[in-house]
Image: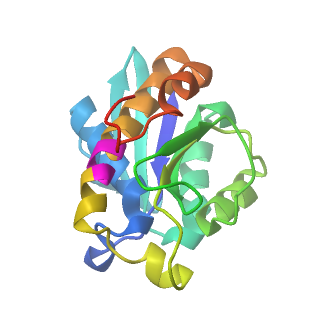
Amino acid sequence: MYLVVGLGNPGRDYEKTRHNVGFEVIDRLAEKLGVSVNKIKFKGLFGEGIFDNKKVLLLKPSTFMNLSGESLIEAVEFYKINVENIIVVYDDVDIDVGRLRIRPSGSDGGHNGMKNIIYHLQDNKFPRVRIGIGKPKFDMVSHVLGKFSKEEEVLIEKVVDAASDAVLEIIKNGIQSAMNKYNSFDAGKNKA
């Protein structure tokens, strides 16, 4: 069993913002798995499906970004999920728009949502898929809560699709295979 958690902020005001690319990946995964992420459960929106004969749980926390761990830990404790089977998808300002990075573990990298998740899990050894949103030109808050430019939207559409495929690759063939296949992905060059 796998739990895939996409980070973002709930509500219309935050739709399509840089900070919500994690939610977009969950939506894309739901499409690919033919499931709905519309049950209100674990302080978030929740759905479940099957992929490669494994149960896959999809979660979009409704706690707001900085409290994402509150939602995640409820699902983890309810289903007794091993930490290695939790995949967290989120935005990263240290990665260029159109790129993604997969890692098997690591620090929070200054990301408040990840800080809260690591705090609640008391562990950082879980796979993560980080989606590049680029460095802020001015202040961090208006950058992460801002929307992508038209040019960036084209790249984000491709990287969201690649990130959802990367999650499925982790589930099917493991983290190493996904890293080999997707860490060189560049939506600007249009190939995985």
Q: In which quarter of the image is residue 86?
A: top right
The residue at 36%/70% (across/down) is 10
The colour scheme is rainbow
The residue at 31%/39% (across/down) is 161
- Give percent across and percent down for residue 143: 46, 77
Observer-nearest residue: 176 or 150? Answer: 150
Residue 100 against residue 108 in the figure, above or below = above
- Give percent across and percent down for residue 66: 58, 72
Residue 175 against residue 148 in the figure, above or below = above
Q: Is residue 62 left or right of residue 154?
A: right
Residue 171 against residue 131 in the figure, above or below = above
Looking at this view, name the residue that lies furthest to the right.
122
The residue at 56%/53% (across/down) is 72
Quadrant where the image shows the C terminus: top left
Whether residue 170 is visible here, answered yes or no, is yes
The residue at 51%/84% (across/down) is 138
Report the predominant secondary structure element of the magenta stretch: helix
Q: In this view, does 164 lie to the left or right of 1?
A: left
Observer-nearest residue: 79 or 12? Answer: 12
Total residue callouts: 0
Whether residue 41 is visible here, answered yes or no, is no
Observer-nearest residue: 16 or 121? Answer: 16
Residue 66 against residue 168 in the figure, above or below = below
Looking at the rendering, the stretch of residues picked out in magenta corresponds to 155-159
Q: Is residue 20 left or right of residue 127?
A: left
Observer-nearest residue: 162 or 75? Answer: 162
Residue 164 shown in magenta: no
- Give percent across and percent down for residue 148: 32, 68
Looking at this view, name the residue that lies furthest to the front.
189
- Give percent across and percent down for residue 19: 44, 67
